Image (spheres, rainbow, N blue to C red):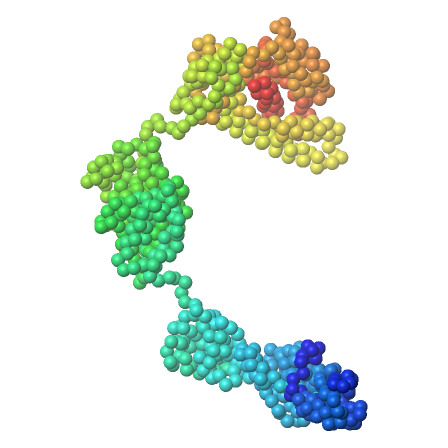
Amino acid sequence: MALAADLPVPDEYVVGPGDVLLIQLYGKDNTQYELLVTREGVVQFPGIGPIHVGGKPFVKVRELITRRVQGQFIGLKASVQVGRLRNIQIFVLGDVVRPGSYTVSGLATLTNAILASGGIKRIGSLRQIQLKRQGKAVGTLDLYDLLLKGDNSADARLQPGDVIFVPPIGKTAGISGEVKRPAIYELKNETKLEELISLAGGLTAEAFPHSMQVERIQGNRERTVIDIDMTKPEGQQTLLVSGDVVRVYQVSDQMERIVTLSGYTKRAGPYQWTEGMRLTQLISSLGDLPTEVDAHYQLIRREDPKTRFIELLGADLGAALAAPESDANFKLLPRDTVYVFSIHENRRAVLDPLLDQVKAQSRPDRLEREIAIDGSVHHPGRYPFVPGMHLGDLLRAGGGLTDKAFTLEAELTRYSAPDGKERKQEVMVVSLDGALGKDSKNDPQLKPYDQVVIRRIPNWTGEGFVSIRGEVAFPGRYPIAQGEKLSSVIKRAGGVTPAGFARGSVFLRESARIREQAFLDRVARELEEQVLIVSAQGSEIGTEKKEAILEAQTLLKQIRATKALGRVAIKLDRLLDGEVEQDIALLDGDSILIPQKPGEVTVTGQVYFPTSHLYVKSYGRDDYVSKSGGVTERGNSSNIYVVHADGSVSAGSGWFSSSPDMGPGDSVVVPVKVERLKAMKLATDLTQILYQLALAAAGLKVLGTL
C-alpha cells in the first residue's frame, strides 16, 4: 500500500497511534520536531506538555497545535504536517481471491484493500461490497459507480479493525453484439432492458435496434428466445430476469439506394442512386475511365429484391454516350453493379462466377440465360443471354473480331428441347454482314444456349520466325510463310558466302530437342534406378557388377551433363547443288547455323588427349584416334562414332575395323565402355544412348565455333 502512503494527507484524515507529526516552529527562533502519537493518542510537545490528538481529524489537530504554540510561545508560529503514517490492520473477507488480514497504510480505502487481496472473484459481487466497523455496517461500495462513472465518493477511508466483506454476486444479465461495453452485468436497481443497455454504454452506430433477442431460461428450466424491438416503448420497458442474455445485432452490410462501379475503372466503389438514374450519370464520359477500356461492353448485375434472382445484362457505354436519350443509355436500379472491362485483360475472372450464380438458379420455368462464342474473337467464352440479343451484341461482348477472323460468315449451333424429352442440336451457317453493321436488318437474333464459332481465315497461321546465323550474306531472324522451305530462307538471306561450309550446317528444331531431352531424362532415371537396385545387394554383387556400377555412374554423369540440341541432319551442300528432295519445310523456331570452312577433325571422349587435328585426306578414323593418344582403359573401342559435319553419324565395328570416310569438320567420339551395363538389364538401348551423347558432343563443338 505504498501508493496510499505517498498521497497528500487530507484534512479529514483521523490521526491515531503510530502517526508521526512534523512540527516546525518559526519566528524569532526556528525549531523542528518529529512527534509520535502514542497509544493513548497523545504527543509530548517540548515546552508545552502532552497534547491529546488521537481520534481527531487532521484539520482539528493542526488548529489545536497552532493555537497552543501561539499561546505558549511569544513570537513563534507553527507549521503542522503528517510525516510517517501509521499502519493499520484490516480484514478482507468473502468472495475475494485472497481473503484474510492485511496491514495497510492509514490512508488506505476500500478499493486499496480489495486490490491488496487480489481482487474480487468471478462469483463475488461488485455492487454490494460492505464496510463493517465494530460489528456494524457503516457503508456500501458499488464498484460500477467507480468503474463506469468515475465516482469514488463511496470509497471510504479505512480505520483499524475494519472488515471489508464481498458477498456473492447478485442477479446478472449479459449483453453482446453492437453495444459499447458488451459484458455480463450485475443488476442492482436495474430492472428494464434500456437500463441494461445504459450500463453497457449504449448502442453502437452499427446497432440494429429493430431486432434484438433476449435468450431467457423460463421457470420450467427451458431455454427460449424473445424478440425485442427497441424502437418501441414496450421494447424499451422489457423487464429483465436474472440469467438473461441480450443480443444486439448489426445492421445489414448490404447498402441500399446505391449503385456500384467495379472493374477496369479509376474510381471503383459505391455511388448514390437517384430516381431515374441512367448509365451515363454513373459514367459521364470515357475520360473517366482508363484509356484501354472496352467502351462497347459493360456488364450489369441486377438482383430482384423479392425473389433474390440474379439477372445479368449487357450495356454499350459508347452508344449510350452518343445517344443519351436512346434505350442504349441503360436505366439503373438500386443495388445494380456495373462491371467495366479492359480490351486486353481476360474477362473470365468476373464473368464465370456470375454466370455460375445464374446457372445455380436455373430451373425448367427459368432457363439458364447463357450463350457462348468461340474462335477468332478477342475474348471467347460464356456470356449472359439477354432477350432480344443479336449476333452483333455477342460479338461486342467478345471484344470484337481478331485480324484472323473470317468475316463473311460464322457457324451457329442451336440447342432446343421442343417436347421437353430430348435435346436437339441444329448447326447453321449465318452471315456476319448484319453483325458487323453492313446490313443491320439481317443481324441474326440469338436464343439461350446458342454457341457461335467465328472461323479463322483459311491458311492463316500465326507469325512464325526462323533464325539464320553464320556465313550468309544477311544473317538474322526471318518471318516465314506456311510451308516455306529452307532453300527460300537461304535465298532471302543472300545465300551462303564463299567462306561458308554448307556441308557442316547445323539445323536445330525445338520439337526434336524436346524429344531428345525427354529421352536423355528417361535414360538417366532408368540408369539411376538400376544402380540403386544393384548397389542394394551389398557384398553379394560380385566384382563384375561392382565394375558395372562404376561404368554406370560415369555414364550417368555424362547423361546428366548433356543437354539435347535438337539437331536434324540436313544436306545443305546437296540442296545448293539442286537436289530438291533435300529441301526441308520450316517450322516456327527453327534455327540454321552455317559455319566457316573448317580444316580440322575433332577427337573427343575416352582418348588420352582429346583435341582437334588438321584434316589429312589420307587419314582414317583410327589415325585421328591414334594421334590423340589412343583409347583409354575406360574407352569403348568397339563403338567409336564419327559424327559427320552434316549431322549424320557413322558407327564403326571396332578399333582397326573398316573406317568411314572422313572429311573436314567431322568429329570422332570415343564413348565410355558399357559392356558390363548389359548385366544390369538396362531397358534402354545402349547404342541409342551413345549415339545421342556423340551427336550432342559434336553439335556443341560446331556451335562453339560460331
Point out the image quarter for the N terminus.
Answer: bottom right
Residue 116 screen position, x and y as percent: 68, 79
Residue 173 screen position, x and y as percent: 51, 79
| 496 horizontally vs 337: left or right | right
256 w.r.t. 585: above or below:
below
Mark count: 0
Depth check: 637 or 263 in front? 263
516 w.r.t. 379: above or below:
above
Residue 519 screen position, x and y as percent: 56, 29
Which residue is painted at 38% across and 81% down in the image? Answer: 234
Residue 415 screen position, x and y as percent: 28, 44
Point out the image quarter for the C terminus.
Answer: top right
110 w.r.t. 202: above or below:
below
Which residue is painted at 46% across and 23% down in the image? Answer: 477
Residue 540 quadrant: top right
Which residue is painted at 62% across and 91% down in the image? Answer: 138
Which residue is painted at 53% across and 79% down in the image? Answer: 149
| 354 horizontally vs 39: left or right | left
